[in-house]
Image (cartoon, rainbow, N blue to C red):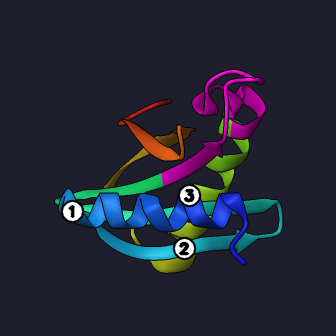
Amino acid sequence: MDSLGNKGEKLACRYLRRKGYNILQRNYRYKIGEIDIIAQKGEFLIFIEVKTRLNREFGEPFEAVTHYKQERLRRLAESYIVDNQEHELDYRFDVISILYEKKKPIIKHIENAF
């Protein structure tokens, strides 16, 4: 059985593909953590954090991407760029927030989130 996070990442990938994104990698791991999705669209390399929640008990899903998490994602992205020689592409950080309401996922895609 899929975890909620894995289910959200699969849903996010389907959403991104429909929007014309090319998924390069899921769950890129390095010493300090993980990037959920790395994609490309046009001349942009996009590092995407996916947050999925069943309710708003702890706020909107995207609110879980704290300043600390953003800094860690920046360091992870730098590692990916160096390891994959992606120097010629501009890059940005997006957040995909998925909230289930009445068992239906509501997706918010925040481009250039930080």
Say whether residue 6 is left or right of residue 47.
right
Q: Is residue 114 above or below residue 92?
A: above
Type of the residue with mark 2: Arg
Q: Which mark is residue 8?
A: 3
Q: Secondary structure at mark 3?
A: helix
Farthest residue in the right direction? Answer: 31
Q: Which mark is residue 18?
A: 1
In this rendered view, identify the residue nearer to me: 112 or 77.
112
Mark 1 and mark 2: Cα distance apart in space: 17 Å
Q: Secondary structure at mark 1?
A: helix
Q: Is residue 13 above or below residue 44?
A: below
Q: Which mark is residue 26?
A: 2
Mark 3 and mark 1: Cα distance apart in space: 15 Å
- Quadrant of image for the N terminus: bottom right
- For the point 71% across and 72% down, the residue is 29
Which numbered disc flags the more N-terminal residue, 1 or 2?
A: 1
Q: Are marks 3 and 2 in contact (CB under 8 Å)?
A: no
Q: Are marks 1 and 2 in contact (CB under 8 Å)?
A: no
Mark 3 and mark 2: Cα distance apart in space: 12 Å
Type of the residue with mark 1: Arg
Q: Which residues are magenta?
A: 48-69
